[in-house]
Amino acid sequence: MKIDRLELRLLTLPLVQFFETSFSRVHDKHFLLVRVDGDGVSGYGECVADRDPYYSAETNDTAWHVITEFIAPRVLGVEFAHPRELFPAMKAIRGHNMAKAAVEMAAWDLFARQRGEPLSATLGAAVAEGSAPRRTRDRIASGVSIGIQDSLDELVRKVEHELAAGYQRIKIKIKPQWDVAAVAAIRERFGAIPLMVDANAAYSIDDGSADRLGQLDDFALMMIEQPLDYDDIIEHQTLQRKLRTAICLDESIKSVNAAREALAGNACRIINIKPGRVGGFTESIRLHDLCAAHGVPVWHGGMLESGIGRAANIHLSTLPNFSLPGDIAASKRYFDPDLIDPPIEVAPDGTIGVPTGPGLGVEIRHDRVERATVRQTILNSDEVTKTQPVVA
Ligand code: OSB
Ligand code: MG
């Protein structure tokens, strides 16, 4: 596989409804879309960086900079036998996992399309040499992530709506002013539904806010996601010792090495996998396998992706240790219309069918991509200047 052209776009899409976390309320999605071309075939990758460095240090502008200046020269015009070779080829670049993952995802899609197989099959076959390819599932379990609302009544209405749609578990966003009462309201109205919370690092042991989390222990939650700081492992270890409820780490798992530290210290019992956070599919598979070896279940996180990134998340979720419902919901909750046709839909049993066509297996609506584009650049293998020392 050789990539001879890389197209980078910045897109803006209005969200169907605002989404509020402990760190921000957003009304629109701003993201980069990568297209790579090789041997007359195209592959696509969606970047999960945002406009602001609030979920992670990366932004669309840092990803744009790193892709055009540092990643493109390392992948354009280079012969790769398999997309698993891309992450090592980018090793000299420290961090910037979302930028790396976007290009790597496009390369996986390109590779799978060139072979005429669904991305799930390519991912399932990416096992240690000598091992048999993994049989991947053909439907994945879908959960829903509900943002912070303006009132508890509104929250209860939203939960009711999503339960009626069939989602297999409800996650709500929490922060110190929106936690115990919100969970209590849901339990009171809906009883023992599969329920979890995500704090996006809003609590701290130092200021005492983490003490509130003990109160959540009485609500039989499936897990509490990322209660403490985004780069912390040790304090989560201390907190997990005190809580009966499982801690799930999201932001803190920035790499497979970070996961190794978290698992060694029992800082969590569950891990959320987002390829953008760890540098792509190759690293996500390693993380998935590491967790499996520790008996730690994983689930696929979401970053309000368009249908393109959402389809990629669905394919990765077919691996066997994705044993809990992911944050991969129907297109219509986010974008109307989505960038793909048909949109991603959730069946009444709360599952999503895995696309069966080559690569991502979804039809990209190029007219909609064009309309949403606010900035674009094209890099060709014969023009890109390889000014940086390229270390294999
Ligand atoms: O922490 O999982 C998170 C959205 C943006 C940034 C971080 C997170 C989220 C979500 C939304 O929870 C998941 C989704 O529905 O895409
Ligand atoms: Mg999260």
Image (spheres, rainbow, N blue to C red):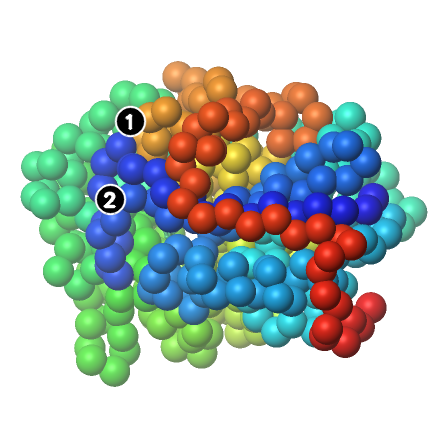
User: What is the total number of numbered labels drawn onto the structure image?
Assistant: 2
Q: In the image, 93: left or right of 53?
A: right
Q: Amino acid at mark 2?
A: His
The front one of 51 and 68 is 68
Q: Horizontal and vertical percent for residue 170?
A: 32, 38
Do we see residue 97 in this rendering? no
Q: Quadrant of the C terminus?
A: bottom right
Q: Secondary structure at mark 1?
A: helix
| C-alpha distance separating marks 2 and 1 | 24 Å
Question: In the image, which is nearer the foreground, mark 2 or mark 1?
Answer: 2
Q: In the image, 86: left or right of 14?
A: right
Q: Which residue is mark 1?
A: 163
The front one of 385 and 63 is 385
- Which residue is at the far bottom? 206
User: Which badge, 2 or 1, is on the more N-terminal residue?
Assistant: 2
Q: Residue at x 78, y 71 (%)?
A: 390
Q: Amino acid at mark 1?
A: Leu
Q: In the image, 154: left or right of 336?
A: left
Disc marking residue 27: 2
- Which residue is at the far front? 383
Do we see residue 312 in this rendering? yes
Q: Horizontal and vertical percent for residue 289?
A: 68, 53
Vertical arrangement, residue 232 with respect to residue 256, above or below: below
The front one of 357 and 42 is 42
Q: Horizontal and vertical percent for residue 69?
A: 62, 66
Q: Residue at x 44, y 28 (%)?
A: 368
Vertical arrangement, residue 156 with respect to residue 289, above or below: above
Vertical arrangement, residue 261 with respect to residue 329, above or below: below
